[in-house]
């Protein structure tokens, strides 16, 4: 079957699934989004774009941004980076504090909140103008300068970031946060509040499908070896305590966010993104997981 036909099949099958997921409410602004939104976009290295639904409507990328911040940190620093954050699956919810206490403030991986906060701290130390540089990075990999932060989502999360504040404070007590606590929190929440569409995210994730290079002009954004490592972390840690389940059902490296987005890649083949706001109990898009499972089933191949 051709990709567009496969996407059409996925679209019609999703409409028959009763969605038991719930839109995130702990960031109040995210709760204002219609649970009915649904879009999917597949960007194939050899044959271009395929899509359905709300694939060009922007949504809050939230934790999908952690892939971009890790990319920036890895392009600046070598292996010393991994003295401050590990690369092991956590088996715990994305905002959990529990392992930090007995693992000396070293987060399990860069894709749980604790790990992403350490990466934010590192970028604040390394970059001249972290917010601008972060947005510039996203503009560069998407070749789209109109991508920006949703101020309402940014303010909404800032007003309710009690757990992230607790994570930063705990890590600061272990000496694993170097900068001002408020500054780290502010930058982390800023990157999470970036809005992108499925199409824009698929373009950004093409870098990871294409050995670290932009498809448009073959600029090397990250070395091939480091890209392989990021893909490995997406595979093992991209879905928190559901990373095993995602590998089991879908079989692609990917990353989710509480805005209901999922971005995944098939190295050497394509980048694919889905957006459906209702989340399952582990904080991953309920329909997004179904859609990607269908994709690798109908195409007949995953990375396994
Ligand atoms: N900004 C969100 C938070 O820190 C991101 C979480 C997510 O997308 N899983 O809670």
Image (cartoon, rainbow, N blue to C red):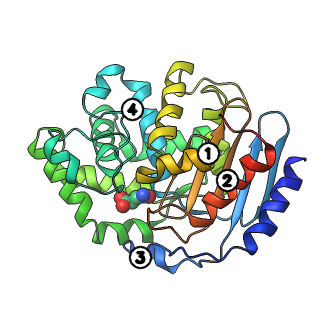
Give neighbour class at mark 3: few <14, some 14-19, many 20+ (Cα, 10 Å). Answer: few
Q: CA distance from mark 4 to mark 3?
A: 30 Å
Give neighbour class at mark 2: few <14, some 14-19, many 20+ (Cα, 10 Å). Answer: many
Q: Which mark is residue 155?
A: none
Give neighbour class at mark 1: few <14, some 14-19, many 20+ (Cα, 10 Å). Answer: many
> Which residue position holds label 4?
73
Of circles 1 and 2, the one toward us is 2
Which of marks 1 and 4 precedes in the sequence?
4
Q: CA distance from mark 4 to mark 1?
A: 20 Å
Label 2: state its secondary structure: helix
The x, y position of residue 164, in whole percent, is 26, 58
Residue pictured at 67% horizontal, 53% vertical: 292
- Using the rendered view, name the quadrant where residue 74 is placed: top left
Label 4: state its secondary structure: helix
Residue pictured at 35% horizontal, 39% vertical: 109
Which of marks 2 and 1 precedes in the sequence?
1
Residue pictured at 59% horizontal, 77% vertical: 35
Mark 4 close to ligand 1, CB under 8 Å: no
Which of marks 2 and 3 precedes in the sequence?
3
The x, y position of residue 246, in whole percent, is 55, 49
Q: CA distance from mark 3 to mark 2?
A: 24 Å
Q: CA distance from mark 3 to mark 1?
A: 25 Å
Image height of 35 relative to 301, above or below: below
Label 1–label 2 contact, CB within 8 A: yes
Label 3: state its secondary structure: loop
Horizontal arrangement in the rendering, residue 69 relative to residue 15 (left or right): left
> Which residue position holds label 3?
25
Q: Which mark is residue 292?
A: 2
Label 3–label 1 contact, CB within 8 A: no
Horizontal arrangement in the rendering, residue 286 relative to residue 293 (left or right): left
């Amino acid at each position: 079957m051709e990709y567009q036909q496969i996407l059409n099949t996925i679209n019609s099958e999703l409409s028959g699934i009763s969605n038991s997921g719930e839109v995130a409410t702990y960031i109040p602004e995210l709760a204002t989004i219609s649970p009915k939104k649904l879009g999917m976009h597949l960007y194939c290295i050899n044959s271009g774009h395929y899509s359905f639904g709300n694939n060009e409507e922007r949504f809050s990328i939230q934790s999908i941004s952690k892939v971009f911040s890790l990319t920036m940190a890895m392009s600046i620093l070598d292996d010393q980076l991994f003295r401050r954050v590990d690369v092991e699956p956590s088996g715990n919810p994305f905002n959990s504090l529990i392992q930090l206490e007995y693992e000396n403030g070293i987060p399990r991986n860069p894709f749980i909140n604790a790990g992403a906060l350490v990466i934010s701290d590192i970028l604040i130390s390394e970059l001249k103008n972290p917010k601008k540089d972060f947005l510039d990075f996203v503009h560069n990999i998407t070749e789209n300068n109109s991508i920006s932060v949703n101020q309402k989502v940014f303010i909404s999360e800032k007003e309710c970031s009690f757990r992230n504040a607790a994570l930063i404070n705990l890590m600061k007590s272990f000496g694993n946060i170097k900068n001002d606590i408020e500054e780290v929190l502010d930058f982390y929440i800023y990157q999470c509040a970036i809005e992108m569409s499925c199409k824009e995210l698929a373009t950004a994730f093409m870098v990871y499908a294409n050995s670290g290079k932009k498809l448009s002009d073959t600029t090397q954004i990250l070395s091939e070896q480091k890209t392989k490592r990021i893909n490995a972390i997406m595979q093992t840690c991209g879905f928190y305590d559901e990373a095993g389940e995602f590998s089991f059902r879908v079989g692609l490296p990917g990353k989710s966010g509480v805005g209901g987005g999922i971005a995944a890649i098939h190295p050497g083949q394509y980048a694919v993104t889905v957006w459906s706001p209702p989340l399952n109990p582990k904080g991953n898009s309920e329909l997004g997981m179904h859609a990607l499972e269908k994709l690798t089933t109908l195409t007949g191949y995953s990375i396994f």
